[in-house]
Image (tube, rainbow, N blue to C red):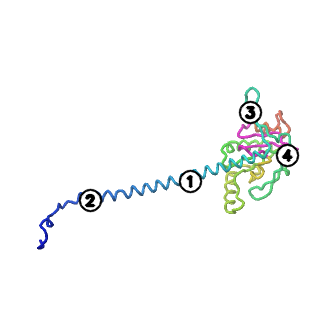
């Protein structure tokens, strides 16, 4: 011991470091906990952002649909007899079908006027529409069954089309073409159906179909998924052989 220093400074302390190691280790263990909290917070923030974006998109589309419906002639649901399912009555019934000219997937313009003299089913649909996926096989069967009598379907896709972005436009067309190929749709498929939705009542629900006779007059309309039998009955009405046995597949 150095001279002049008090004796108490020379006192020795226990060699154990347990008291010091405890708080240090606890500090090290808290780092992963903080990191997990940050990751969890980031994930929750991303999920919240997606939820908000989905809600905003829904509200935008809802308001757009309401604006279209407000400016268009409104259809109505008329109660069926004996408490049956209400029937969709379009204001277009017994009136000339509105002009319809749209591009197909190859860019070729197709017009309803080009089918003068034929009965035409104008079917508005979308790739994301689940009821459309149920209805499409019925349409294919009925189109093949009645085509020889002068019947055709125009499938009008209402999927979003972005004309301002060529790359995005190409992707959107590919998605529609993939659906057409998967479903084996043999009839013309047109795109950008929203451009002609207003004259047809705003398309409040998908699928929506209009049956046009050989003179270009709308004779029936269907809102939403109905049945194959009902579609066939309206095809016969458009062909002018309602109530007859004509149209059955011939061997």
The x, y position of residue 111, in whole percent, is: 82, 53
Task: Please report the residue visible at 66 percent of the width from the left and 59 percent of the height from the top.
Answer: 171
Residues at circles 4 and 1 in contact by the CB criterion of under 8 Å: no
Mark 2 vs mark 3: in front: 2
194 to 15, vertically: above or below: above
Side (left or right) of 10 relative to 160: left
Residue beneath disc 2: 21
Q: CA distance from mark 4 to mark 3?
A: 29 Å
Which quadrant does the C terminus fall into?
top right
The x, y position of residue 27, in whole percent, is: 33, 58
Neighbour tally class for label 2: few under 14, some 14-19, many 20 plus, Cα within 10 Å = few
Q: Secondary structure at mark 1?
A: helix
Mark linked to residue 143: none
Neighbour tally class for label 1: few under 14, some 14-19, many 20 plus, Cα within 10 Å = few
Q: Earlier in the sequence, mark 2 or mark 4?
A: 2
Q: Earlier in the sequence, mark 4 or mark 1?
A: 1
Residue beneath disc 3: 86
**Nearer to me, 121 or 82:** 82
Residue beneath disc 4: 118
Mark linked to residue 49: 1
Q: Secondary structure at mark 4?
A: loop
Point out the stretch of residues depicted in magenta. Answer: 200-229
Where residue 1 sits, quadrant-wise, is bottom left
Q: CA distance from mark 2 to mark 3?
A: 78 Å
Where residue 163 sits, quadrant-wise, is bottom right
Residue 220 seen anywhere in this rendered image of the structure: yes
The x, y position of residue 26, in whole percent, is: 32, 56
Task: Please report the residue visible at 78 percent of the width from the left and 51 percent of the height from the top.
Answer: 196
The answer to whether residue 2 is magenta is: no
Q: Earlier in the sequence, mark 3 or mark 1?
A: 1
Mark 4 vs mark 3: in front: 3
């Amino acid at each position: 011991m150095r001279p002049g220093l008090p004796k108490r400074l020379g006192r020795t302390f226990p060699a154990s470091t347990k008291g010091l190691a405890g708080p240090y280790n606890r500090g090290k263990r808290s780092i992963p906990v903080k990191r997990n909290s940050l990751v969890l917070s980031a994930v929750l923030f991303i999920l919240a952002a997606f939820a908000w974006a989905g809600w905003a998109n829904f509200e935008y589309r809802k308001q757009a649909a309401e604006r279209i419906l407000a400016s268009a002639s409104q259809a109505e649901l008329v109660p069926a007899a004996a408490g049956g399912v209400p029937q969709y009555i379009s204001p277009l019934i017994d009136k000339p079908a509105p002009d319809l000219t749209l591009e197909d997937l190859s860019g070729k313009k197709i017009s309803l006027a080009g089918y003068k003299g034929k009965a035409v089913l104008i079917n508005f649909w979308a790739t994301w529409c689940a009821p459309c996926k149920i209805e499409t096989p019925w349409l294919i069967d009925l189109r093949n069954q009645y085509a020889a009598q002068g019947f055709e379907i125009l499938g009008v896709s209402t999927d979003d089309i972005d004309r301002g972005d060529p790359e995005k436009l190409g992707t959107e067309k590919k998605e529609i073409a993939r659906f057409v190929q998967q479903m084996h749709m043999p009839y013309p498929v047109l795109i950008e159906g929203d451009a002609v939705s207003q004259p047809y009542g705003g398309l409040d629900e998908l699928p929506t179909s209009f049956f046009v006779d050989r003179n270009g007059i709308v004779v029936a309309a269907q809102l939403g998924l109905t049945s194959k039998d009902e579609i066939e009955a309206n095809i016969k009405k458009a062909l002018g052989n309602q109530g007859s046995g004509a149209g059955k597949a011939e061997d």
